[in-house]
Amino acid sequence: MNKELPSREQAIELLRKNSCPPKIINHCEAVAKLAVETAGKLEKKGLKVNLNLVEAGALLHDIGRSKSHAVNHGVVGAKIVESEGFPEELVNVIKRHVGGGITAQEAEKFGWPKDIYEPVTLEDKIVSYSDKLIDGSKRVPIDREIERLLVEHKDAAEKVKKIHEEITRLLGD
């Protein structure tokens, strides 16, 4: 796996090649725009962030939705990107973006392969967080997303809240 990260154009082409609907591609582009903006602000604060990884990860985070709209779309997407020979760090961003992260216990219940499905790196966290701030292709307040998750998935709401607190602390907002 020595392939480089895909360019923006290559990532969008990969989404199209995998038959992602335009709605998903628009969402991924909106998430990428916000994620790169956030990563740039963090970089200005002196943090080391791989902007290319953030952009590629955000553009491809929902590629698995071409085959599944369930929670496993992160795992499905990671397999697609891995099969294309892209770096493990990109595969990880994709499989770790769902719901602020999936614990080992949750992954076991889903029958997923033993792995880490929670955001670990700053890049993982930026993509996961940016995804929660974009509904369709529009920016939404994080409080709205947390409220929605509290009704549907209380654990996910807590994870998203934790990532929100960490990113805003790092941004100094």
Image (tube, grey):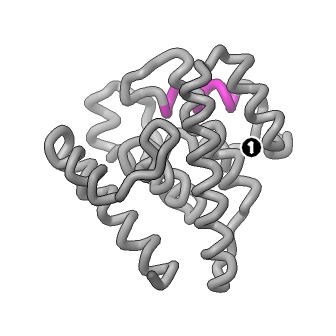
- Residue visible at 41% across and 49% down? 132
The reply, left or right, for residue 165 in relation to residue 39 is left
The secondary element bearing badge 1 is classed as loop
Q: Position of residue 118 (x, y in %)?
A: 42, 51
- Residue visible at 71% across and 53% down? 53
Q: Position of residue 123 (x, y in %)?
A: 60, 59
The reply, left or right, for residue 21 in relation to residue 167 is right
Q: Position of residue 155 (x, y in %)?
A: 21, 49
Q: Which residues are magenta?
A: 74-82
Please identify the residue farthest to the left as the structure is shown. 151
User: Circle 1 is placed at which residue position?
Assistant: 87
- The quarter of the picture where residue 35 lies is bottom right
Q: Is residue 148 above or below residue 46?
A: above
Residue 60 visible, this angle = yes
Within-10-Å neighbours for mark 1: few <14, some 14–19, many 20+:
some
Which one is nearer the viewer's eye here, 128 or 147?
147
- Locate the C terminus by quadrant: bottom left
